[in-house]
Amino acid sequence: MEYFKIVQSLIDGMKNIILDKEKQIKLALSCFLARGHLLIEDVPGTGKTTLVKAMSKLLGLDFKRIQCTNDLLPGDILGSYIFDAQKRKFFFHQGPIFSNIVLIDEINRATPKTQSGLLEAMAEGQVTIEGNTHVLPEPFFVVATQNPKEQVGTYPLPESQIDRFMLKISLGYPSKNAEKTLLKQGNIDDKLNSLRPIVTRQQVLDMQNKVLDVVVSDAIIDYIGEIVEYTRSSNQFKYGLSTRASFMLLCSVRAWAFIHGRNFVLPEDVKEMIIWVGNHRLKSYETKDPFNIIDNMLKTIPIP
């Protein structure tokens, strides 16, 4: 594929910064190319912010970071109208949401009111303030980090917010060898600052459009449909995957095939991506690992 070398260069560039996490890097890039949004749940200090910064620098896109606290207001994210006394007129002052890549750090430390302010932006690529609609820049990619719910000062994300995230991943701690390398190389900021864009904004948009051209056969569509129907009819889950989730699964498998140099989707792509599309959406009646539940589900559904 025409853009495969560019994709590989992006992956290699991020691998030099985030060591021993190629799978997570590919998932994050797939989510971006599929025009989704990414949720990363992990303890502090595992490289979540570094991953997003490296991606934005290599893509050459605008980047903003929002640090969530319990006193953060929706206007602090979206922006607000400010009165100019000299011109005797209100002007709209854009908030940090007006960027190509937005990192919302520790999203579950923000109150539900502030979290709800993100819904329109993430679903429609626009925000409405005082009756006026403002379109967000393209591409637009939200990456939110979330602390484990047992940590102090966190609010659970409502289902409507969770469903806006295409994928949920976790970086986890680095391996022993990766940790040693990180300690030896010292401050990572110097390596981050040395990164330069390897694509133009137009090439980024072109790649996102190319993902839409990845062929998905009727058999794959039926396979996705069987998986979604299973989650809705099985008594294992409190509620099944939404129509938005099934569409996001379709988009994500196209992107996963694309970054692996294919213009067609395989059943293995679906089996890979349903894990990351479903792990934050599917809640069981019992306290079980969602990854195990999804894995068991896949064993019962015939592969096309």
Image (cartoon, rainbow, N blue to C red):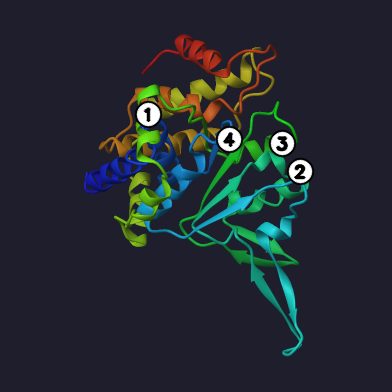
Labels 1 and 3: the sequence-earlier one:
3
Q: Are marks 2 and 3 in contact (CB under 8 Å)?
A: yes
Q: Residues within 10 Å of mark 3 (few under 14, many from 20)?
A: few
Give amino acid for label 3.
Answer: Pro
Vertical placement of residue 103 versus 254, above or below: below
Secondary structure category for the residue under label 2: helix
Report the quarter where the N terminus lies: top left
Labels 3 and 4: the sequence-earlier one:
4
Q: Nearer the viewer, mark 1 or mark 3?
A: 1
Q: Nearer the viewer, mark 3 or mark 4?
A: 4
Report the quarter where the C terminus lies: top left
- Please state which of residues 261 and 142 is positioned toward the viewer in this rendering: 142
Residue position marked by numbered label 1 in the rendering: 180
Q: Is residue 91 left or right of residue 246?
A: right
Q: CA distance from mark 1 to mark 3?
A: 39 Å
Residue drawn at 58 percent across, 31 percent down: 43
Residue position marked by numbered label 2 in the rendering: 112
Q: Is residue 46 left or right of residue 180?
A: right
- Residue 38 position, x and y percent, is 52, 40
Q: CA distance from mark 4 to mark 1?
A: 19 Å
Q: CA distance from mark 4 to mark 2?
A: 21 Å
Disc number at residue 6?
Answer: none
Labels 4 and 2: the sequence-earlier one:
4
Give amino acid for label 4.
Answer: Pro
